[in-house]
């Protein structure tokens, strides 16, 4: 699983929730259909990201699809409008649950990356006491890779580099290295400004 892709992709999916809730608020007759499509796409993306939570999106879809089959009102003269309102209410509760699943998955990925980011920040601080970063060229990704190779070769950071390499895919590792370098650069700039 690539944590930064989980965060990026699922944040895109969660941004659609306000639109769906606005549809519910307006009583839009296409609300349930749009939510089912949203859930299908969520499931597809989660499957590609190897998230087991994607299976729950299918379960949530079925709650919407079976609503009119299992709804047995006491009043047999129930109108289509009342059925639609009931289905929309069920669909809205499905959106709430799906949003919660997405939010938890994002939070878990962010926390996992932050844990490694903090470890790498400590390691980079030690690394920079003994080394200077190479000059940054035009190829930023190549520059980050060059720094990573230096971290792997340095005695004081070799074990940390091996641990991070074994725990994260290269994409996540590069992502946190970029964040750490940015954090350290900001800290250095702020320290310089305080001195002047």
Image: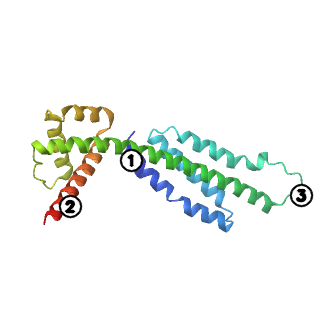
- Percent position (x, y) of residue 138? 15, 56
Q: Earlier in the sequence, mark 2 or mark 1?
A: 1
Q: Nearer the viewer, residue 70 or 122?
A: 122
CA separation in Å, label 2 and label 1: 31 Å
Q: Secondary structure at mark 1?
A: helix
CA separation in Å, label 3 and label 2: 71 Å
- Determine whether, in the image, residue 187 is placed left or right of residue 44: left
Q: Kindly identify the residue that appears in the image at 63 percent across and 45 percent down.
A: 60
- Percent position (x, y) of residue 143? 16, 49
- Residue 77: image tag: 3
CA separation in Å, label 1 and label 3: 50 Å
Is the C terminus in the top left, top right, bottom left or bottom right quadrant? bottom left
In the image, which is nearer the foreground, mark 3 or mark 2? 2
Mark 1 sits on what residue?
A: 5
Q: Secondary structure at mark 2?
A: helix
Q: Residues within 10 Å of mark 2 (few under 14, many from 20)?
A: few
Q: Is residue 92 above or below residue 122?
A: below
- Percent position (x, y) of residue 97? 60, 49
Q: Earlier in the sequence, mark 1 or mark 3?
A: 1
Q: Residues within 10 Å of mark 3 (few under 14, many from 20)?
A: few
Q: Nearer the viewer, residue 105 or 65?
A: 105
């Amino acid at each position: 699983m690539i944590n930064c892709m989980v965060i990026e992709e699922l944040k895109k999916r969660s941004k659609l929730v306000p639109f769906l809730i606005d549809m519910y608020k307006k009583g839009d007759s296409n609300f349930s259909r749009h939510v089912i499509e949203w859930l299908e796409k969520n499931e597809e993306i989660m499957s590609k990201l190897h998230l087991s939570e994607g299976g729950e999106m299918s379960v949530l879809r079925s709650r919407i699809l079976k609503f009119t089959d299992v709804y047995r009102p006491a009043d047999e003269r129930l109108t289509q409008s009342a059925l639609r309102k009931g289905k929309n209410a069920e669909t809205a509760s499905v959106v709430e649950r799906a949003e919660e699943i997405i939010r938890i998955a994002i939070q878990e990925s962010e926390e996992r990356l932050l844990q490694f980011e903090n470890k790498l920040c400590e390691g980079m601080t030690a690394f920079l006491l003994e080394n200077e970063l190479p000059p940054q060229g035009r190829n930023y990704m190549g520059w980050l890779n060059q720094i990573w190779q230096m971290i792997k070769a340095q005695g004081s950071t070799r074990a940390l580099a091996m641990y991070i390499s074994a725990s994260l895919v290269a994409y996540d590792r590069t992502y946190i290295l970029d964040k750490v370098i940015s954090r350290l650069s900001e800290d250095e700039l702020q320290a310089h400004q305080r001195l002047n």
